[in-house]
Amino acid sequence: TENHPAQVPSDAGLGELRQAAAGCRACELWEPATQTVFGEGPETARIVFVGEQPGDQEDRAGEPFVGPAGKLLDRALGDAAIDRRDAYITNAVKHFRFTPTPKRRIHQSPGAEHLRACRPWLEAEFAVLKPEIVVCLGAVAAKALISPSFRITRERGQLLPWTPPGVAAAEDGDDEPDEGAPAQTWMLATAHPSAILRTPDEGRAAAYDALVADLKVVAHALA
Ligand code: URA
């Protein structure tokens, strides 16, 4: 089967984008995967969380962050007093990449080609949502959206002025800003919930607390 670039309908809402993404053939990951896992959340969300790619359970359910990493993220959002209704949750790559083994499907990080192929969907999500804050969960999302030299360890937890690709920001000047685009938009990167689950016992509570502390920065910025 031939791959062809993501066919993103113009001026589409989230429902139409989701439908179009279900048939995406922009890279080869669609074939072994169960389904496209599109983002989820209300069109009015002020925060967009960007993870890496769906995992095994997300691939089966067709929903982002519903497995172990999602459970941890839910708990952290609660502890940071972030209302799920303010949040849209998506991934940089919308198909599960894995190596099949007899016992289980082993997660494989997405390659640059998968990030590139999938990016039009993320930009289309940003264009519809016009979020005030984009939270990158982990290095893959942060490097894909900011720069390959972005280092989570050094720059996590900081609100950085940043305009999501796909959004014409109010402060851009020449062009008419998108209707409904916030005057100031931000990015914040933090650890990936899966990285916390992989942290050895003795360090896990501190790693979790650091995630919650970063999320509280987001909560305060929105207050
Ligand atoms: N990890 C991710 O990055 N995204 C998901 O949706 C689930 C686990």
Image (spheres, rainbow, N blue to C red):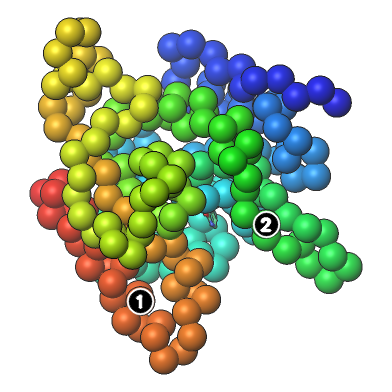
In front of the other: 36 or 52: 52
Residue 36 placement: quadrant: top right
Please, what secondary structure does the residue beneath circle 1 have? Answer: helix
Q: Residue at x 20, y 14 (%)?
A: 177
Q: Residue at x 73, y 55 (%)?
A: 98
Q: What's the amino acid at mark 2? A: Gln
Q: In the image, is 63 to the left or to the right of 210?
A: right
Residue 95 placement: quadrant: top right
Q: Residue at x 70, y 32 (%)?
A: 27
- Quadrant in which the N terminus is drawn: top right
* Alpha carbons under labels 2 and 1: distance apart: 23 Å
Q: From this viewpoint, which residue is outermost toward the bottom?
A: 202
Task: Say which label, 2 or 1, has the lower sequence index.
Answer: 2
The answer to whether residue 50 shows anywhere in this view is no
Residue 178 x %, y %: 25, 15
Residue at the spot of label 1: 207
Q: From this viewpoint, which residue is outermost toward the front?
A: 149
Residue 165 placement: quadrant: top left
In front of the other: 84 or 100: 100
Q: Residue at x 67, y 60 (%)?
A: 107
- The circle drawn on residue 108 is 2
